[in-house]
Image (tube, rainbow, N blue to C red):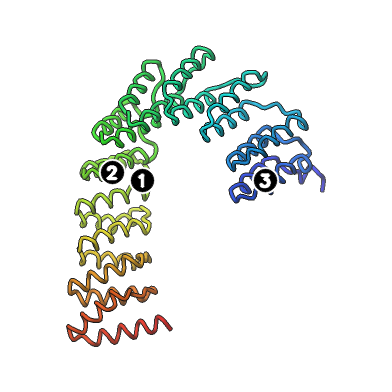
Amino acid sequence: MTYESCKFHKGIFINLMKHFSKSSLHDKVFHAFFSIQSIVREKPSPKAITTYLNLLLDSNRVDLARTLLLYCKRNLTYKPNICVFNILVKYHCKNGDLDSAFDVVKEMRSSEFSYPNLVTYSTLMDGLCQNGRLKEAFELFEEMVSRDQLVPDPLTYNVFINGFCRRGKPDSARNVIEFMKNNGCRPNVFNYSTLVNGLCKVGKLQDAKGVLDEMKSSGLKPDDTVTYTTLINFFCRNGQIGEAMELLEEIKENECPTDTVTFNVILGGLCRDGRFEEALDMLEKLPHQGVYLNKGSYMIVLNSLTQKCELHKAKKLLGLMLSRGVWPYYATSNELLVHLCKAGMADDAAVALFDLVEIGFLPGLDSWELLIGLICRDRKLLYVFKLLDELVITNT
């Protein structure tokens, strides 16, 4: 076998470094990086260096990051490129050390290999906005355009849209979108989604829906459910379940993929509005329509039914859950049994307990005492003996 036939590709080591870092195996990341030159027989590529630098900073290993850059400069004659500088700027901004971030930019300007780009400026402006320094962020924006003659893109503008929304000023964020249009930059889905979220947070739901309509009229449509789910969530919490259901239908019409989160929000809204039949109908039908429901989907409705003493519906839902292999939480099961006992529904309580015991459930002392007492008062002692037998068998 020749050397060429078993040659390792550098990409293997980059993937190894990422996987080791996710598992917090930092020593193995180190060894993977420094194995590249000896095994691949080539110097680590700029991509390998920036990957390792990013992983070190994400793990807050600043000392090792400095050592890495010094090693690359001395031993690999590597000159930091714009990716390296931007990684450092991002790290300092993320940690609120804006002075160090601007120092990196100064060093970048003095370098013959790199110069600030849109990513650099966007990261700096976002750092300023997150620290409430919007005026300085706008001054930096003007410097970017006038000094470096960079043309802002939707991502750059979104820094300001998000900054204003974060501070509860969606009207100012709206002005940023108008400014974009006037300067020949077409807002994208991300810009509109950020504004929708900002308007929802201050309770301007109709304005948010108007922005969604504006987005669609401009030829854009959400390519995921995040924008819709945000608006649906706020409509549900505001008691406007009708509007939320309309948006759900709109999602289906636009063939936008829905996820469990969206339906869980709707189920919660229906329950808060007392529309339990619709919630139960959704739980019954959605899996047959290819929609994945998790345990949380069922528990949202079961908890609401139990707390509102809709016990016949709760008992029915419990049966559906068990038939689909979804086990309720212990606290909810116990609470349901207590409510059934207090409502005098001995037969339903006993049947529910039998079903739960089969999956390993042991009732709490409060529900057990209530159930046995209720059955004894109704002179249904056979039930008592069956329950005792069932519990003894379960515990042996």
Amino acid type indicated by mark 2 = Leu
Q: Label 3: state its secondary structure.
A: helix
Where is residue 243 drawn, in percent x and y? 22, 41
Compared across the picture, whether 276 is left or right of 133 comes to left
Where is residue 196 drawn, in percent x and y? 32, 33
Q: Are marks 3 and 2 in contact (CB under 8 Å)?
A: no
- Spatial CA distance of label 1 from label 3 is 38 Å
Which quadrant would residue 332 be assigned to in this image? bottom left
1 or 2: tag closer to the N-terminus? 2
Q: Label 2: state its secondary structure.
A: helix
**Residue 248 numbered tag:** 2
Which quadrant would residue 364 be assigned to in this image? bottom left
Amino acid type indicated by mark 1 = Thr
Between marks 3 and 2 in the image, the one whose residue lies nearer the viewer: 3
Where is residue 165 drawn, in percent x and y? 35, 31
* Residue that carries the numbered disc 1 in the rendered image: 258
Q: Are marks 1 and 2 in contact (CB under 8 Å)?
A: yes
Q: Which one is in front, 283 or 355?
A: 355
Q: Residue at x 66, y 21 (%)?
A: 113
**Residue 29 numbered tag:** 3
Compared across the picture, whether 273 is left or right of 87 comes to left
Q: Residue at x 64, y 50 (%)?
A: 25
- Spatial CA distance of label 3 from label 2 is 46 Å
1 or 3: tag closer to the N-terminus? 3
Residue lying at the far right in this picture: please name it.
2
